[in-house]
Image (cartoon, rainbow, N blue to C red):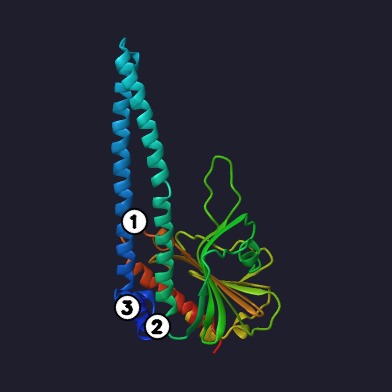
């Protein structure tokens, strides 16, 4: 897909939006400005807190040097003053810790929730999305995704921002997920998958499953590893299709769905795509880099990167929904 095609996809998404009343509209600010203002506020609070902590530490160290001198001096008055100062500093440090220890974590939690709500408002305010619900406490369980038959040997799962709703009358499940592989001694092991996940029921009827992968040919990442029972049905450049031997996947999956999936382009922060079809269930795994998957903190919010990722999601929803 050319850069022109990418821009057209993004513009098409924008044109098809049905803007609903969200916190973004109420504040009359673009969603990216809401996030960037909150990020700036949090980061400034963090740097100010660090600066204050460093100043306090410097003062405490200087005071300790003076206190040691007074306590060890052959002078009762200096000893009394030294012990008094030591007690005052200890009490002051305890008070500072008690008063400040929850302040930044609570502000961070509020910021993360704001980012999730604001981005969800951007994604799910488009035409066709309805009954959007999100529970900040809900987490995926390992069985929820392992059953898709895309990844195996998964030892743990991290998830956030799980959203349920309907798109064009079809229920869906969405979330941000990391699937973890077994740890190795003294070696950092990369996850099996980090990215966005979408699942939706389908009306297909066949045995087994079909996995379509769009990979980075130069640096393949997050490739499916639960494919020992499958064979390669088709492979051309970055496009790979896995299924049971002898399966005619073109006869099972509509060419319109295939054509829409092929609109997804690896690059611009999208690292890999896995789409798995079962009889009755479709799931999409979109692997992204840290720009998309990390909550913006020390670097500005990358509006262009997120817009491209939203266009990717729209392509996926349009591909797997059955109209």
| Secondary structure under the numbered disc 1 in the rendered image | helix
Answer with left or right where residue 157 lies relative to residue 110.
Answer: right
Q: Residues within 10 Å of mark 3 (few under 14, many from 20)?
A: few
> Does residue 26 appear in this view?
yes
Task: Locate the C terminus by quadrant.
Answer: bottom right
* Residue shown at the point (31%, 38%) measured from the top left: 54
User: What secondary structure is found at the residue carrying circle 3?
Assistant: helix
Residue lying farthest to the bottom in this orientation: 323
Secondary structure of residue under mark 2: loop
Residue farthest along the top direction in this orientation: 74
First in residue order: circle 1 vs circle 2: 2
Q: Nearer the viewer, mark 2 or mark 3?
A: 2
- Cα distance, mark 1 to mark 2? 28 Å
Q: Quadrant of residue 322?
A: bottom right
Left or right, 75 with respect to 247, comes to left
Q: CA distance from mark 2 to mark 3?
A: 29 Å
Q: Which residue is mark 3?
A: 4
- Foreground residue, 161 or 27? 27
The residue that disc 1 covers is 42
Query: Who comes first in sequence, dot 1 or dot 3?
Result: 3
Q: For the residues carrying marks 1 and 3, which lies nearer the camera in this image?
A: 1
Circles 1 and 3: CB distance less than 8 Å?
no
Which residue is labeled 2 in the image?
20
Residue 287 placement (x, y as % from top left): 48, 64
Q: Tell which of 17 and 100 is nearer to you.
A: 100
């Amino acid at each position: 897909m050319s850069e022109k095609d990418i821009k057209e996809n993004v513009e098409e998404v924008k044109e098809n939006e049905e803007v609903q009343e969200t916190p973004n509209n109420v504040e009359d600010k673009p969603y990216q400005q809401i996030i960037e203002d909150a990020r700036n506020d949090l980061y400034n609070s963090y740097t100010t807190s660090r600066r204050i902590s460093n100043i306090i530490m410097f003062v405490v160290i200087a005071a300790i040097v003076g206190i040691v001198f007074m306590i060890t001096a052959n002078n009762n008055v200096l000893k009394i003053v030294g012990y008094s100062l030591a007690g005052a500093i200890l009490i002051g440090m305890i008070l500072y810790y008690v008063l400040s220890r929850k302040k930044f974590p609570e502000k961070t939690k509020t910021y993360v929730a704001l980012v999730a709500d604001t981005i969800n408002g951007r994604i799910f305010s488009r035409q066709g999305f309805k009954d959007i619900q999100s529970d900040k406490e809900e987490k995926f369980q390992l069985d929820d995704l392992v059953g898709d038959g895309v990844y195996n040997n998964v030892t743990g799962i991290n998830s956030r921002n799980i959203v349920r709703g309907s798109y064009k009358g079809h229920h869906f499940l969405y979330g941000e997920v990391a699937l973890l592989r077994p740890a190795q001694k003294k070696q950092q092991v990369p996850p099996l998958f980090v990215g966005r996940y979408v699942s939706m029921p389908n009306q297909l009827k066949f045995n087994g499953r079909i996995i379509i992968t769009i990979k980075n040919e130069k640096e393949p990442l997050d490739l499916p590893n639960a494919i020992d029972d499958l064979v390669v049905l088709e492979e051309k450049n970055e496009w790979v299709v896995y299924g049971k031997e002898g399966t005619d996947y073109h006869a099972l999956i509509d060419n319109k769905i295939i054509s829409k999936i092929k609109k997804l382009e690896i690059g611009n922060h999208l690292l890999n795509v896995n789409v798995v079809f079962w009889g009755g269930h479709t799931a999409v795994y979109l692997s992204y880099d840290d720009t998309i998957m990390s909550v913006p903190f020390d670097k500005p919010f990358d509006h262009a990167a997120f817009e491209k990722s939203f266009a990717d999601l729209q392509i996926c929803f349009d591909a797997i929904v059955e109209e």
